Amino acid sequence: MTTRTGNGRPRLVASATGRGPVVRTRLQLRLRVDERGWVTPDSADDLRKGLNTYAPGTVLELNLGKGSCLTDYNAVRIAEYVSRCATVYLLSSAATGDRPHIEGGCAYNADGVLDLIRMAIDHVSAHRDAHKC
């Protein structure tokens, strides 16, 4: 927002000073998947064990690769790391659009893995916001 002062250059209005566009970091994370298709809460690209907690406002692409099995406690661990992100995109190369198969707290197909992680992120994010109120 600018205002003109006479014939000079436009000058920023005081209310708009310091209010630039929001800068969001865009990151990609590939989760480790073992030879049987079990997704673990470890990065496939990082040599360290575990994941980093991402800063608020991060846009994250969470790649599950060929993952087809996931336990609910691992889904919650992953959700805790990404719950502060502004946007999380879930990517899977094994998902086919089938009905999610989740039984006894464990997902047994790629579509179930996507659904279980989505539910865990929603749950953890909702509880994180409730504590701030």
Image (cartoon, rainbow, N blue to C red):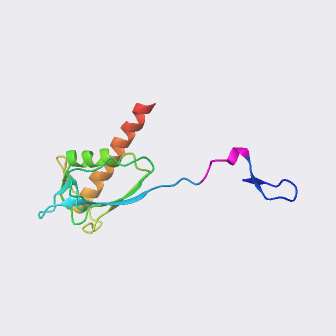
Q: Where residue 1 appears, x then y in whole percent?
A: 72, 53
- In percent of the image, x 37 and y 42: which residue is there? 125
- 124, 51: nearer the viewer: 51
Q: Quadrant of residue 91?
A: bottom left
- In percent of the image, x 24 and y 58: which residue is there? 46
Part of the protein shown in magenta = 14-20
- 68, 99: nearer the viewer: 68
Q: Where residue 79 appears, x then y in whole percent?
A: 30, 47
Q: Where residue 8 appears, x then y in whole percent?
A: 83, 58
In the image, is residue 70 above or below residue 133? below
> Does the segment drawn in magenta span residue 102?
no
Is residue 57 found left or right of 13 in the rendered image? left
- In percent of the image, x 60 and y 52: which residue is there? 20
Q: Quadrant of residue 126?
A: top left
- 61, 130: nearer the viewer: 61
Furthest residue in direction front, as rendered: 8
Is residue 66 found left or right of 6 in the rendered image? left
Inspect this view and state whether residue 79 appears.
yes
> Does the segment drawn in magenta span residue 18?
yes
Q: Where residue 78 appears, x then y in whole percent?
A: 27, 49
- In percent of the image, x 16 and y 62: which residue is there? 37
